Amino acid sequence: MQGIFDEFYRISANGSKLNNLMEVITSRENILLAFRNIKKNKGSTTAGVDGKTIAEFKNMNIDEFVSMIQKSFSNYTPKAVKRVDIPKHPGSNKTRPLGIPCIKDRIIQQCIFQVLEPICEAKFSDNSYGFRPNRSTEHAIASLYRKAQVYGFHYCVDIDIKGFFDNVNHAKLLKQIWSIGIRDKQLISIISKMLKAKIVHKNGSKEYPSKGTPQGGILSPLLSNIVLNELDQWIDSQWQKFPDLKEVKCQYNKKGTKIRSSEFRKLRKSTSLKEINIIRYADDFKILCKDYETAYKMDLAVKDWLKERLKLDVNPHKSKITNMRKKSTDFLGFRIKLNLKKGKFVIKSNISKKAKANIIRMLKEQIKVMQRSTLPNKDFGNYNAKVIGFHNYYNKATHISIDMGQVAFSIKRTLANRLKPKKCLDLSKKNFLMKQYGDSEQLRTAVGGRIIAPIGYCKHKHPLAKDARINKYTQSGREIIHKGLGINKYILSFLIKT
């Protein structure tokens, strides 16, 4: 399938339209690939309204399975979606609605997703980082740091969309799918049916949605990016992707990124365009400007644009303009501010207050589980995994060591009272914690001989921007991915053949 996906990406990048996609979506190879992708996902063991999981199909004859999925496509009618409310944050009282489709519908959605993703990836903005291959929160944070510190975008416009996933306009979304280059009417009809699938609540009540994409569906993240891609492209066209000036020669850096500084200098001299940038992760985005006047105009313009073009309302209480030289702004769990140092404004970042409170709450709850544990190896391992996960995510904050020190102080009493840890003098075992933290003095706390990961010991790691050459749908882009993973293709080929 990889060659087909690559070709779809190339065609879409060239601006051509794609028809007759259902032939590829319903092909035997695509269906089997979808099954493998679903099977390796932990969510495959979660049942929908029919009570079935991936186990229902594991022992099924391959030809029968492929035939069953193909017949489902021919006259597709989705089953009801099970609605479950989950906490917005661990320990939070606020909930987020999650829609769980039946396992067969999930396989069908995966078949569609695999074909649509390369087509959409060719059209998506470089400033969008959420729910996309080879992109992460680290890349979004790195972009924000660079634009604020190096390029002088000190004003930040925060706009909070009210219940984005629950308020996506179906008619508008289907038009956007068509305009992005997907011109298969049968496929668009199937997506329309998926969007309107009946929802069954926990109390047994039923709902027929007229708007929104259910969170939990495999297609939902891609569809949400299609909706907001129009916003990305509109903001990009104001400055960053303003039509190239042909008389200006372009240069490229070692990573293949186009250097447009000469173009931007020409634009500053010859036009009155305002410099603006957008950084988006799913429905959480920031618009960066160089002065308050531009930020104020963009705040009003974007709110009107979202309402008129995408039929989306804005939460006025959470939307604001921030001068990062004077106040901090929150983004993806980080609190970011600019501080004056040696005549220059540099980034100062911490864990946001809400995220820090969640970390403390989660660790205290895990300590309580460890206290009354009947499976200590598993529960102590879960605690260490949480600590390492927090460190790996939040170590992009410049003041991470201070923040984690405060977290360690907050849980110190709970840890001491409930687990009564002791100093561990023997660090001879070369386990994962030793590799992660080295021979640290803080790595000497143990309970019953089990070493506990030191929450207060964390060093800042500079966030890395996305390498523009990396691309899942080009041969050269995949080679860089494989090189980074340390894959030896000769050994892999030998293993496959033998």
Image: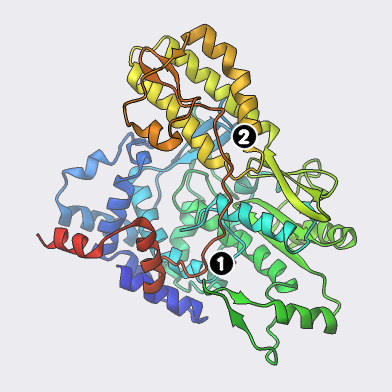
Quadrant placement of the N terminus: bottom left
The image shows residue 140 at horizontal and vertical percentages of: 61, 54
Q: Residue at x 48, y 43 (%)?
A: 216
Q: Earlier in the sequence, mark 2 or mark 1?
A: 1
**Amino acid at dot 2:** Ser
Q: Looking at the rendered structure, which numbered label has been put on residue 295?
A: none
Q: Nearer the viewer, residue 124 or 475?
A: 475
The image shows residue 8 at horizontal and vertical percentages of: 41, 74
The image shows residue 469 at horizontal and vertical percentages of: 48, 70
Q: Nearer the viewer, residue 85 or 469?
A: 469
Image-based side of 246 in relation to 207, left or right: right
Question: On screen, 474 above or below 430?
Answer: below
Report which residue position mark 1 lands on.
124
Local crowd size for mark 1, using a 10 Å CA cut-off: few (<14), some (14–19), many (≥20): many
Image-based side of 434 in relation to 205, left or right: left
**Disc 2 and disc 1 in contact, CB within 8 angstroms:** no
**Amino acid at dot 1:** Phe
Foreground label between 2 and 1: 2
| Residue 93 visible within the image | no
**Could you tell me which secondary element the residue under label 2 belongs to?**
helix
